Amino acid sequence: MKILPETPLAQIKNKKLASKQQENPLLNSIVSLIDNARRRVAVAVNSELTELYWHIGKEINENVLQHEKADYGKTVIKELSIELTHIYGRGFSVPNLYNFVKINELFPDEQIFYSLSRKLTWTHIRNLIYITDGLKRDFYTQMCIYERWSVRTLQERIDSMLFERTAISKKPEQTIINDLELLKNEKKITPDLVFRDPYFLDFLGLKDTYSEKELESSILHNLQSFIVEMGTDFAFVARQKRITVDNEDYYIDLVFYHRGLRCLVAIDLKLSKFRATYKGQMELYLRWLEKNDMRQGENAPVGLILCSEKSPEQINYLFNDKSQIQVAEYLTQLPDKQLLEQKLQLAIELAENSTKK
């Protein structure tokens, strides 16, 4: 359903209602009850419709598509669409009936699909079912639930190849399964699901030459867009955070807090290709934060070194799977999508081959 922007008259009415609510606690309480009930009704209606579509798909699968002749199935579905549209109106087109069939094929277990329909809308699910790779589909499903993506955000994440850009895509299949199960069952997210490579910073509007200070300032000026690219669980903490070691001052470019990881995240911005010395610098930052800024109940801080280009061999020698430091490239201008796909796929293949050795 398309939500239209508020008219000036509606905005005035809403402001008056808000003012009355502040003056009248009883009104405020009843308005909250009504709004919450409406939200629950909307969720229930969506869930019932989504489950209905699953059952329709099941009926078609069992009673039509079990026949060997594909032409027979096409004919029956077309006729069924005409009849259902005549009786119930829009919503039962041929493509939609095939969508219903698809969800039943992908989620044959009714209880699993029932749980999913309580968390995602039909439009979310429709976008997910045509991701052919099962692990990739599960990644987007669980991240969508965890970060509460809108349908638009989900599609943007798919279009930006988020799965291929996460560290999780470069891990053995069983590791991916384990991390997604942890997220699904215990709501615990791992760093491999959080950090990406490369990061798309095209919204900064930086071209040709620029300084680290300009890069940092542009990020802060576009902080909301930066956090959207980083992930919704990131919260901004500090810029150019000064730390003093041996009477010498150092400055951490950016510090964030990640709610899911429950830790501080130090970000170091570099205009150059990754160098081995950056690791020692970040380790100093992390140890200082752990000793001086980490609060009770938090996990040890992690670091993200953002470079204009990575140095794969150096990184392989310097880091292991247990490292608290991530290294990633950032792109201020997006390359051709086909070239980007090739690059990301190559990175995944190289990582898979290295784990087999």
Image (spheres, rainbow, N blue to C red):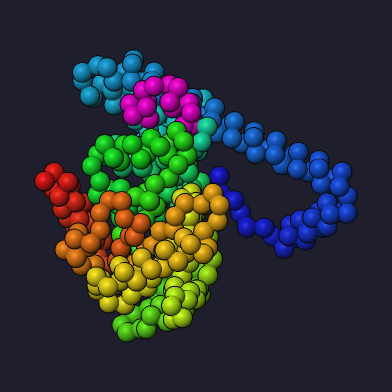
Name the image quarter holding residue 305.
bottom left
Q: Position of residue 149 (x, y in %)?
A: 48, 48
Single out the residue that lies furthest toward the left: 357
Whether residue 192 is situated above or below residue 305 in the rendered picture: above
Task: Report if residue 290 is visible in the image.
Answer: yes
Whether residue 305 is situated above or below residue 149 in the rendered picture: below
Q: Residue at x 15, y 50 (%)?
A: 354
Name the image quarter holding residue 180.
top left
Task: Report if residue 225 is visible in the image.
Answer: no
Q: Residue at x 61, y 36 (%)?
A: 42
Name the image quarter holding residue 27.
top right
Work out which quarter of the rendered image holds the N terminus and state it.
top right
Whether residue 36 is situated above or below residue 264 in the rendered picture: above
Q: Position of residue 244 (x, y in %)?
A: 47, 76
Asked if residue 186 lies left or right of residue 346, the reply is right
Q: Is residue 114 magenta?
A: yes
User: Chief secondary structure of the magenta span?
Assistant: helix
Q: Nearer the viewer, residue 295 or 185?
A: 295
Q: Nearer the viewer, residue 168 or 241?
A: 241
Magenta residues span 103-117
Q: Position of residue 178 (x, y in %)?
A: 33, 36
Q: Position of residue 141 (x, y in %)?
A: 40, 40
Q: Is residue 88 magenta?
A: no
Single out the residue that lies furthest toward the front: 246
Q: Residue at x 54, y 49 (%)?
A: 297
Whether residue 5 is situated above or below residue 61 in the rendered picture: below
